[in-house]
Image: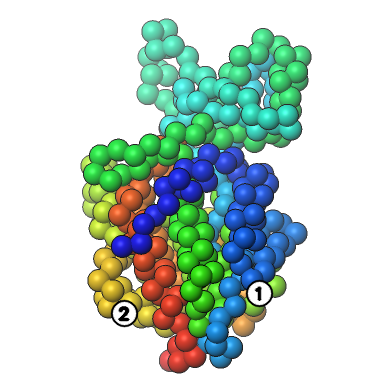
Amino acid sequence: MNMIDLELMRKLTEIPAVSGHEDPMIRFVRTYMEERADRVRMDKLGNLAATIDGTDPNAPSIMVLSHMDEVGLMVRRIEPNGFLRVVRIGGIEERSLLSTQVRVITGKGEVPGVVGLEAHHVRPPEKKYVIPPADKMYVDVGANSCEEVEEMGIKVGDPITYMPNFREYGNGLIMSKTMDNRAPLTVLLQALDHFSKERPKATIHFTASVLEEMNQRGPLPMARILKPDAVLNLEVCIATDTPDLAGVAADIRLGNGPAVYLYSFHGRGTLGGLFPHPGLLNQAERIAEKESIPLQREVVIGVVTETAWLQLEGEGIPSMDFGLPCRYTHCPNEVISKKDAENLLKLVLSFLESLDRDFRLVRG
């Protein structure tokens, strides 16, 4: 089995990259790519594409995608007593925010803090089981005044992210902030490293995108530059093997392998979603069976990925999502299986190796 690089994954989870503020991650990923790719391009939004030229010019080109950004908060207002009022960036889980350690990313560096929570002992009964919205929460950075906050380098508009907390635990599981999407990003970077040494038939554009957690349309400019024949997106998918999600959606379990999205649809105010292109889906299922890679089947409403928009570019781009099962998404401690990550890497490598001039993407 292809081993997943846990030190690379750990490093990626530690780098702050709240959506719209991905520059530290862009710098790290760009350096990694430049050491391995035939060429690296960056568009004006910050999307990165590392190209490995295939040996067969008649084989299709494919964009393999994974987003770099993460959910978080932003400083909205500084109170006279030094506390920070915030707004959400992306779909950060408000239920898990209270009393959570965070870090404010400033122009001078990082400032530790904690999301405040009134003491249980004096909380009135009507508030005991109420989760306030993020704009009613505050962050405590240990300051006593606006002036002290300013001395720390904190300004309105600064992003806030969870504290790093990468940890392995029982039965080969890993918990950390930002497994969405640093675990799939690890797979993408390891696949790039592999094909930099063993050149594929097809040209592959390994693309690390921005703004997924904000508007999911971040990689569109890069797709217009690359004009790939197909897109393979590497994401997380919702694990439903916990007591609270049993029977809610498709049966997706940690340790049972990666998943292929058969249907994703946002279902909350936007008509965005994806059915995978049949040619890509059939190839993925054939490869998984041939290589004895367990492959779960995901059908979900409430989730939408960048492929919902990428598929509509140009004359249409055949697209497909692979999902890495993940518990507690958008919370401070997201959980994945190391074995699933390794099987996802194996599936991605085998799938990309299979693309040649005989591969067809014609419907009907």
Q: Residue 194 carries which label?
A: none
Instruction: Classify the position of the C terminus by image quarter.
Output: bottom left
The residue wearing badge 2 is 286
Q: Residue at x 59, y 78 (%)?
A: 53
In the foreground, 245 or 184: 184
Q: Which residue is drawn at 68% across and 30% down?
A: 109
Residue closest to the far front: 197
Rendering coords of residue 7 (x, y %): 45, 45
Q: Is residue 318 shown above or below 8?
A: below
Residue closest to the far top: 122
Give SS at disc 1: helix
Rendering coords of residue 320 (x, y %): 45, 71
Q: Are marks 1 and 2 in contact (CB under 8 Å)?
A: no
Does 91 sit left or right of 105 as displayed?
left
Residue type beneath disc 1 = Leu
In the foreground, 178 or 218: 178
Residue 235 in sight from this viewpoint: no
Residue type beneath disc 2 = Arg
Rendering coords of residue 18 (x, y %): 60, 42
Does 213 sit left or right of 22 as displayed?
left
Q: Which mark is residue 226?
A: 1
